[in-house]
Amino acid sequence: MPVSIRVCVPKESREGEQRVALVPDVVKRLRAMDLSVSVQSGAGESAGYGDEDYVAAGADIEQDADKLLAAANILLTVNPLPAQQMAALPQGCVLIGFMNPYSEPERFATLQGKQVSAFSMELIPRISRAQAMDALSSQASIAGYKAVLIASTLLGKFFPMLTTAAGTVRPSKVLIIGAGVAGLQAIATARRLGAVVEGYDVRAAVKDQVESLGAKFVDIDIKAEGSGGYARELTAEEKAQQQAILARHVAAADVVVTTAAIPGRPSPKIITAEMVAGMKGGSVIVDLAAEGGGNCELTEAGKTVVHHRVSIYGPLNVPSTVSGHASELYARNLLNLITLMIKDGALNIDLEDQILRDSLITHGGEIMNAAIKDKLAGGAQ
């Protein structure tokens, strides 16, 4: 029986991107499902995979990006496709990747016109059954880990306590703001490096998770649990209460790592310039929410700003800097999602399945996501 479904992986076009959507081990598993796989030449180089690794796993190598796109039944990406590649997609194909769905919704009109079934990895629902496909979490875990390593290189101090012939060096104090996946991994990493760690989140329900990792929970007596595992927006009175208590903990910290981001919305401003001025000279802030505007009001995306001898760094695309494992985890997320839509060797997108339904942006010539549909309708008026 000839293989009828071809999975294609292009080289990522985002500047500085080192990840790839498929790794050779996952290629083998797709081939075992009777899917054929084509990878653009050089797509995995920055993640440590050569063309020969993909060939050994059963993939074809395609030199020409246009030919690769034209042959795709399923196209897998890490970042959103550039507009010209969106326009070149075959009619009715499946596109899966991070889509940045709430930005420039007019892009999706192109996919709608081509009857592309576009799945956004940001929209995978946060339910138990979808955990194996939750790419936001897999990549956030890497970002939290790397943020602490970045902070350790910027800080002019040891993290652990050291006893030396010249005397005892006290451990650094680290404050992690936001106890989601990234924050919890940051806490665990800072503890492994020997720091004294505090964790803060407006969701009081995560207190046990923070403490289970050996950190002290900063409790400001505000309960702000929201939907989908995210926190709700604080009122003005709650923000004032938050900042008054946090200011003391920020001032005592050698390192602050902020991780509070809400998809599709600006990052909440938690650390003020006044709070930064109250920190010790040489202290460091690593703001993982920089792409959304930052949790610190002094953050500049992609830059290091020094204010009152405190360094504030706003890194971009942190998971890409751990490209090998980031690609491996992301490829597994994609594999688990693809498995849901392959039945008896044929493509079958079951709209009764919550995971598939909720993550679809376009399908069958329709805009499936209500928020994007409303934005497009508003733009047309």
Image (cartoon, helix red, strand yellow):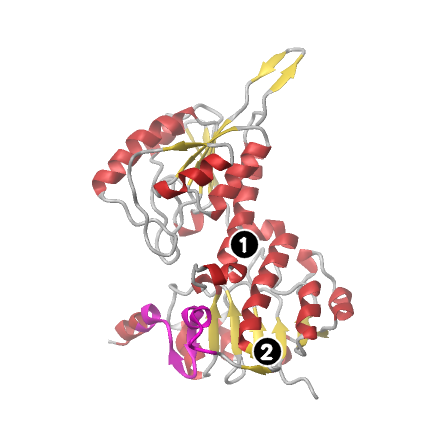
The residue labelled by disc 2 is: 69
Instruction: Note whether 262 is above or below 80 in the view shown.
Output: above
Q: Where does the image place residue 161, in percent across and percent down from the top left?
A: 59, 21
| Relative to 297, 56 lies left or right | right
What amino acid is labelled 2 in the image?
A: Leu
What amino acid is labelled 1 in the image?
A: Ser
Which residue appears at 37% of the width and 69% of the height? 105
The residue labelled by disc 1 is: 138
Q: Nearer the viewer, mark 2 or mark 1?
A: 1
Is 366 contained in the magenta span? yes
Q: Quadrant of residue 352?
A: bottom left
Is 273 contained in the magenta span? no
Instruction: Note whether 219 is above or below 336 in the view shown.
Output: above
Q: Where does the image place residue 210, in percent across and percent down from the top left?
A: 46, 38
Q: Where does the image place residue 143, in percent across and percent down from the top left?
A: 53, 47
- Between the C-alphas of marks 2 and 1, the distance is 27 Å
Q: Name, please, the residue furthest toward the bottom.
A: 1
Q: Which mark is residue 248?
A: none
Which residue appears at 53% of the width and 76% of the height? 341
Q: Quadrant of the C terminus?
A: bottom left
Which residue appears at 42% of the width and 73% of the height? 357
Q: Nearer the viewer, residue 188 or 82?
A: 188
Q: How many marks?
A: 2
Q: Nearer the viewer, residue 266 or 164?
A: 164
Q: Going from the N terminus, do you reach mark 2 or mark 1 first?
A: 2
Residue range of the region highlighted in magenta in the rendering: 350-373
| Relative to 107, 269 lies left or right | left
10 Å neighbourhood of mark 1: few (<14), some, or many (≥20)? many
